[in-house]
Image (cartoon, grey):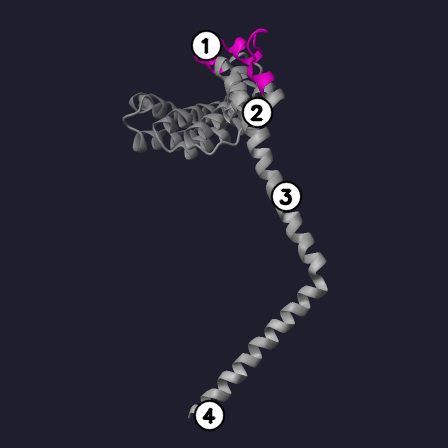
């Protein structure tokens, strides 16, 4: 038994030695390529880290600081000032031109909302379509604003689709407002059956919303 175990151990050692030998042979044949790949990976990795730390991060901080006055002006209802700036502070248009989304994806939503408030519907759509934030309430708001723009441009088919999409995205008390807009557009299109379905959804799912309290008059109108 001991002799058998010794032979098996010797055979295993020979297999290991052969494997090591093949590995060494492969390395010797391809070491320039191997080290070239390793160096490339290191250079790319260090480049990404360097860009993130020394270029992107400072630019993002600068962009966020520039956006703060514009956000404040927006909150105060100064939409023209928030959008255009005044020479002392930047507006969202300049912030986007200089920094892109480094101040946060919301700059596109702000710029779109400002333009919508000012009646610049096409410009508003350009910015709103670039907003791709993942937060459901803000994403729904961006869709509903696009719906408002298309309504103003009398493209009611696109408008109603966006209102319903916004309602599905929000799935909260804000959804009732978007559904009410969708229902009103359906009435304008003469599609009373679809309007009725939307209004009844508000009554069923969002009875405690402001829209829910007054939806009966729209249901009667659709009927």
Mark earlier in primary sequence (4, 2): 4
Q: Where is mark 2, residue-wise?
A: 59
Q: Which of labels 2 and 3 is toward the front?
A: 3
Answer with left or right where residue 87 lies relative to residue 3: right
Q: Secondary structure under badge 2?
A: helix
Alpha carbon separation for disc pair 3 and 4: 55 Å
Alpha carbon separation for disc pair 4 and 1: 92 Å
Mark earlier in primary sequence (3, 4): 4
Name which residue lies at 46% across and 27% down.
Answer: 186
Q: Residue 24 placed where, x, y %?
A: 65, 68
Q: Secondary structure under badge 1?
A: loop
Res 60 → quadrant:
top right
Looking at the image, do the residues carrying marks 3 and 4 touch, with CB atoms under 8 Å apart? no
Alpha carbon separation for disc pair 1 and 3: 46 Å
Mark earlier in primary sequence (2, 1): 2
Q: Where is mark 3, residue-wise?
A: 44
């Amino acid at each position: 038994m001991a002799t058998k175990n010794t032979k098996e151990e010797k055979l295993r050692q020979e297999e290991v030695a052969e494997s090591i030998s093949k590995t060494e042979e492969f390395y010797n044949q391809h070491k320039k390529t191997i080290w070239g790949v390793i160096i490339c990976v290191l250079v790319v990795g260090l480049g990404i880290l360097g860009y993130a730390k020394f270029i992107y991060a400072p630019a993002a901080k600068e962009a966020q600081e520039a956006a703060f006055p514009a956000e404040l002006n927006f909150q105060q209802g100064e939409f023209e000032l928030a959008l255009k700036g005044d020479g002392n502070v930047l507006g969202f248009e300049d912030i986007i031109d200089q920094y892109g989304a480094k101040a946060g994806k919301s700059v596109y939503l702000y710029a779109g909302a400002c333009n919508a408030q000012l009646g610049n519907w096409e410009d508003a759509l350009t910015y709103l379509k670039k907003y791709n934030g993942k937060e459901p309430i803000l994403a729904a708001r961006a869709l509903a604003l696009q719906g408002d723009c298309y309504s103003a441009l009398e493209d009611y088919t696109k408008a109603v689709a966006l209102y319903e999409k916004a309602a599905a995205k929000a799935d909260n008390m804000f959804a009732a407002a978007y559904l009410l807009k969708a229902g009103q557009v359906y009435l304008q299109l003469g599609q009373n059956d679809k309007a009725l379905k939307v209004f009844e959804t508000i009554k069923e799912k969002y009875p405690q919303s402001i829209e829910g309290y007054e939806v009966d008059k729209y249901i009667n109108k659709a009927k």
